[in-house]
Image: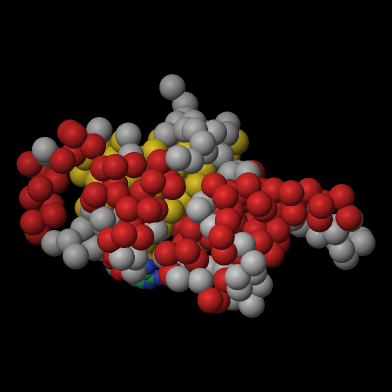
């Protein structure tokens, strides 16, 4: 069965270091797939390859039936792959609503140099429900720079959803959040519509096990194990990998 996304035989080298060495990954429509593994295992590199910011030395990435290996991040975003970075990337002087409106606008028509009114109105209509969905209705008019870290993370997810992704790449979304904020994030991510598949890189295993239906474990640039959260939780191989070195 072919998936929504399939990465095949992906290899990335940095000098003599093999950050990824022949990794395969398949994600199906609506799946919640987590990538875990010790520090330096290659998780972020694989996310970079799938998002288009790193070109692998070998291997292909297919999305929705097409080879997207040669496309950059913007072109992949237009096809439905959107990414959340480790540090929330929001416009600090714009309000939460304005941030989502900007994210919901299509690319500017180069011949005109501005967005037609219809596009702006449609983007404004989408912002309210998305902020609501991500628990930010009360702070819609607050400048993003004045939001708490957890709220900025929620805002970045609302912005990614504004692009109507079919695959959301989440790079350590719990980084820097308090226990309460992580609990809130888990609730919000669990409530995401199944029309969106999620690939999550995360060290917080409580979030991984609460959210994912499939877990792939990387170690030293290779796939060590893949399975359900229960299979991974009880795998002696995985326990050993973590005992050998994870933050
Ligand atoms: N731009 C780069 N230049 C050189 N080496 C790099 C670069 N990016 C990543 N690496 C190396 O590639 C390996 C994989 O890195 P990567 O960030 O993908 O691991 P990770 O599993 O995401 O680790 P962590 O959990 O610590 O974020 C590491 O040894 C890292 O030092």
- Residue 216 x %, y %: 28, 42
Residue displayed at 14% across by 46% down: 238
Q: Is residue 153 left or right of residue 144?
A: left
95 is higher (above) or lower (below) than 70:
below
Q: How many marks?
A: 0
Q: Quadrant of the N terminus?
A: top left
Residue displayed at 56% across by 60% down: 138
Res 21 seen here: no
Residue displayed at 32% across by 34% down: 213
168 is higher (above) or lower (below) than 44:
above
Residue reaching furthest to the top: 1
> Foreground residue, 10 or 155?
155
Residue reaching furthest to the front: 138
Q: Is residue 108 left or right of residue 225?
A: right
Image-quarter location of ligand 1: bottom left
Q: Quadrant of the C terminus?
A: bottom left
Residue displayed at 45% across by 71% down: 148
119 is higher (above) or lower (below) than 8:
below
- Residue 174 x %, y %: 35, 60
Q: What is the quadrant of residue 234 in the picture? A: top left
Residue reaching furthest to the right: 112
- Residue 83 x %, y %: 51, 55
Res 190 seen here: yes
- Residue 241 x %, y %: 13, 52
Q: Is residue 8 left or right of residue 220?
A: right
> Foreground residue, 219 or 238?
238
Q: How is the image coloured?
A: secondary structure
């Amino acid at each position: 069965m072919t998936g929504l996304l399939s990465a095949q035989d992906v290899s990335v080298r940095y000098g003599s270091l093999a950050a990824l060495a022949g990794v395969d990954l398949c994600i199906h429509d609506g799946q919640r797939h987590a990538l875990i593994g010790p520090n330096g295992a290659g998780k972020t590199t694989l996310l970079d390859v799938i998002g288009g910011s790193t070109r692998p030395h070998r291997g292909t990435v297919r999305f929705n039936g097409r080879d997207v290996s040669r496309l950059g991040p913007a072109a992949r975003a237009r096809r439905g792959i959107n990414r959340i970075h480790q540090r929330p990337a929001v416009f600090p002087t714009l309000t939460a609503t304005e941030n989502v409106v900007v994210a919901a606008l299509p690319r500017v028509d180069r011949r005109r140099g501005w967005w037609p009114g219809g596009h702006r109105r449609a983007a404004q209509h989408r912002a309210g429900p998305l902020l609501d969905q991500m628990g930010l209705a009360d702070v819609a008019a607050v400048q993003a720079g004045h939001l708490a870290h957890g709220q900025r993370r929620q805002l970045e997810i609302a912005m990614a959803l504004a692009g109507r992704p079919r695959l959301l790449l989440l790079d350590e979304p719990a980084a820097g959040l308090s226990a309460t904020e992580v609990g809130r994030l888990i609730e919000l991510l669990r409530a995401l519509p199944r029309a969106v598949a999620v690939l999550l890189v995360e060290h917080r295993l409580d979030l991984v096990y609460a959210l994912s239906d499939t877990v792939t474990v990387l170690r030293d640039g290779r796939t060590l194990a893949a399975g359900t959260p229960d299979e991974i939780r009880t795998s002696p191989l995985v326990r050993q990998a973590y005992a050998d070195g994870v933050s």
